[in-house]
Amino acid sequence: MHVQALRWHGRGDLRLEEIAEPGEPPAGYAVVEVAFCGICGTDLHEITHGPNMIRTGKHPLSGQAPPVTMGHEMSGRVVALGGERAGVEIGTRVAVDPCLTCDECRWCLHGDYHICAKGGSVGLASDGGFARYATVPLRGLHPVPDGVSDEMAALAEPLAVGLHAASRAGVGPGDTVLVLGAGPIGIAAILGARMSGAGAVYVSEPVTARHAAAVAAGATEVFDPTTADVRRTVFLRTGRIGPDVAIDATGRPDAVDLGLRSLRRGGRMAVAGITEAALSVDVRQLVLYERSLCGSLGYNFDIPRVLALMADGRLDASCLLTGVRPLSEGPAVVHELTGRTHDHLKVLLTPEKA
Ligand SMILES: [Zn+2]
Ligand SMILES: [Zn+2]
């Protein structure tokens, strides 16, 4: 049997093609019948500018070299198990943590599996969820609670990115937060800050079409940095103190700089956005105000926390979802999302059912 898959062959070379159905999963893996799989900025970046996260040779953990089926933000149903995992049986609905890990490096042993020295991700280092089936690590299976739809479960991965950024930045109850950027990661960061108990959440986003989604995600106020003095305004809104926390979801040096200068004395900033651009920091902005600056990559152990918050109604992520399309339209959707003019945040692809 052959199934449709959306595969990365090289920069600018994404193909919808037929591949063999996966066989029995190896020990420690499971096969999931994909319900929905989200298109990530990382996927678009690999297609337009890659390889970046994708390795051109064999990945040390998966042994796979491109072409590779993309897609790492998936929900689905377990159809084959290569081992046991508590709470998971054939037929269990799951959200997938796609991290591939060596389980023996210094970081894996300390629980920081997301920064494993050899680490990679299903959908980049091995075949992923833009297909009817995906073979994924058994340990990455998280049962989806009743009442959480397969569509929402597919959003758990990108939402975990936002929750992880909020925890890296140390958002605590009542903290005032400034989020730079309201694209998919920014929206996830706003929701992550809210999940972490933030007080006011201010957002800086130049594209006004994105402001409504930021408010729906829980932003207190959204500013256009091209017309508003964001630092000054947030300073005044916070009683002439500045936000406790800033989270960058752009990777743009000007946004990181704005976030850093806006922070209160002793404030903390996490950078979750990424570009190739070099960042130049006025060292005085860090030292003289004793601010902290750190990076935030992906998530670790955050996906089940997101699912739990969805299940008890404390997290409504519907504002992040702007489209669901059949997998067969994948190339056209990718083309649309890499263009300059679209209003999408997260688009899910769904494979044809048998
Ligand atoms: Zn992603
Ligand atoms: Zn490791």
Image (cartoon, rainbow, N blue to C red):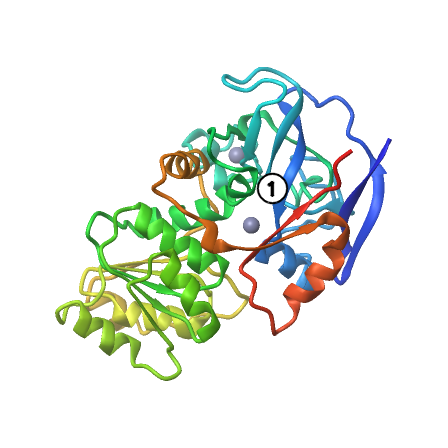
Q: Is residue 178 above or below residue 104?
A: below
- Vertical arrangement, residue 211 with respect to residue 324, above or below: below
Place of residue 198 in the rendered image (x, y in percent of width and height, measured from the top left): 25, 52
Q: Amino acid at mark 1?
A: Ser
Q: Position of residue 11 (x, y in %)?
A: 74, 61
Q: Is mark 1 within 8 Å of ligand 1?
A: yes
Report helix, strand or loop for mark 1: strand
Tell me if residue 280 comes above or below residue 128 in the rendering: below
Q: Position of residue 286 (x, y in %)?
A: 26, 66
Q: Is residue 330 left or right of residue 141?
A: right
Horizontal side of 187 relative to 44 (left or right) equals left
Q: Is residue 175 visible?
A: yes
Quadrant location of the N terminus? top right
Residue labelled with disc 1:
121
Q: Count the marks: how many?
A: 1
- Residue sitting farthest toward the front: 147
Q: Position of residue 89 (x, y in %)?
A: 59, 17
Say which residue appears at 47% left-offset and 29% top-offset.
146
For the residue pair 202 and 218, the one nearer the viewer reads as 218
User: Where does the C terminus fall, quadrant-wise?
Assistant: top right
Tell me which residue sits at (41%, 32%) in the image. Answer: 110
Residue occupying image coordinates x 45% and y 47%: 159
